[in-house]
Amino acid sequence: MRIDNQDIIRVAQQLRDEENAQLSVGPWSRQRHHFHVPTWLVAIPAAVIIGFVLGIWTQKSNQSDAPLTALVDTVYVKVYASQSQQDSVCQAVHVEQNASEGETSVLPKPTPRQTVRRSTASPIAQPAVGSPVADDHIRYDLLVRN
Amino acid sequence: MLIPLRMSAQSDEQLMKRAARGSDRAFEELYNRHARRLQGFFVRRLGDDSDLASDFMHDTFLRLYAARESYREGHSFRAWLYTIAYNLCKNHMRRCHVVEMVTPSSSSKGKESSPVEDAVDSSCDIELELDKNILHDALSSVLRSLPEPYAILFSLHYEEELTVPQIAQITELAEGTVKSRLNKAMKIIKINLKQYENR
């Protein structure tokens, strides 16, 4: 078949239509990036607003707790003590007791365990007066005055 | 009583006039009409890179949107659209140093011409005998290998159906130059199609 200019133009337009039909084009509204706002311009005011709201909330929370806090004279803080800490506390208490009973000005050195004399007045099961370490292994001797 | 025309019934120029006055709906209608075809133009010009073509199409419409208030009544919308598209292509190709685009000085002396272009200059009329089915595939590959000053003019005139004065306005070439280059483009295509004749 003889090919002339019109055939070439017609086939070129046919190729164009075939190629264009395969394209996927998104809608205009989704592609308008010219109103793009930088991230920092959003993040900084957002952080300021969140901080402001949190500050007000914390202040209000403290104010609402104030009457309740005023009623409480002592706050007990629970501190879980390990077994080794319990022993050292007991020893310290015994040493102080011995020192007051004997009215000696010099306290025995705590380093060797054998030199510390156990008080005969207190039983071994309940070693310290005032029980700094309770049976539930919680120390109640740390008091915080309000 | 005046009844406003439906968007789809309005011409490109009427819609652009409305868009220039601030109607986003009119601009969206223009986008819906021309986006696909413009993207296809970029795909063919930028070597089948559909993502890049999509970006360029998007960029063209963004530029058009940004400059919509400067639209002057009576001017062709498509010529304006393709002027932006042509300039984007030209800048891209300059950056890539791939080919030299059509500029008034591009027919410079000292530029080496290809054997095909030399053959075009010496040939008068080329007769071509080809099967229709072969023509489809052959033309597809021939158009891809068409040298750039001619390819973009062929695309603007025959594929995008812009008139010679519009192309002259877009490319800032004289109308006579556009016509002669289109004529030469057709001859190059025919010469390249010749090799498919006896297959």
Image (spheres, rainbow, N blue to C red):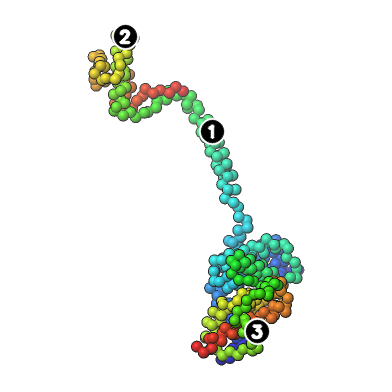
- The span from disc 2 to disc 3 (Cα, nearest Å) is 126 Å
Q: Nearer the viewer, residue A38 or B189?
A: B189
Mark 1: few, some, or many residues within 10 Å (few <14, many ≥20)? Answer: few
Query: Which residue is at the far front?
Result: B110
Q: Are the residues flagged by discs 2 and 3 from a single subunit?
A: no
| Residue at the image point whose x is 55% and y is 43% from the top | A47
The residue located at (70%, 72%) in the rendering is: B104
Label 3 or label 1, whichever lies nearer to me, is: 3
Check if mark 3's residue and mark 1's residue have beta carbons within 8 Å: no
Relative horizontal placement of residue A116, taking residue B166 as reference (left or right): left
- Measure the C-alpha gap from mark 1 to mark 2: 54 Å
Q: Residues within 10 Å of mark 3 (few under 14, many from 20)?
A: few
Residue holding disc 3: B121
Q: Residue at x 30, y 10 (%)?
A: A101
Kind of element beneath mark 2: loop
Q: What residue is disc 1 on?
A: A59
Q: Position of residue A98 (x, y in %)?
A: 29, 13
State which chain disc 2 sits on: A
Q: Position of residue B150 (x, y in %)?
A: 63, 77
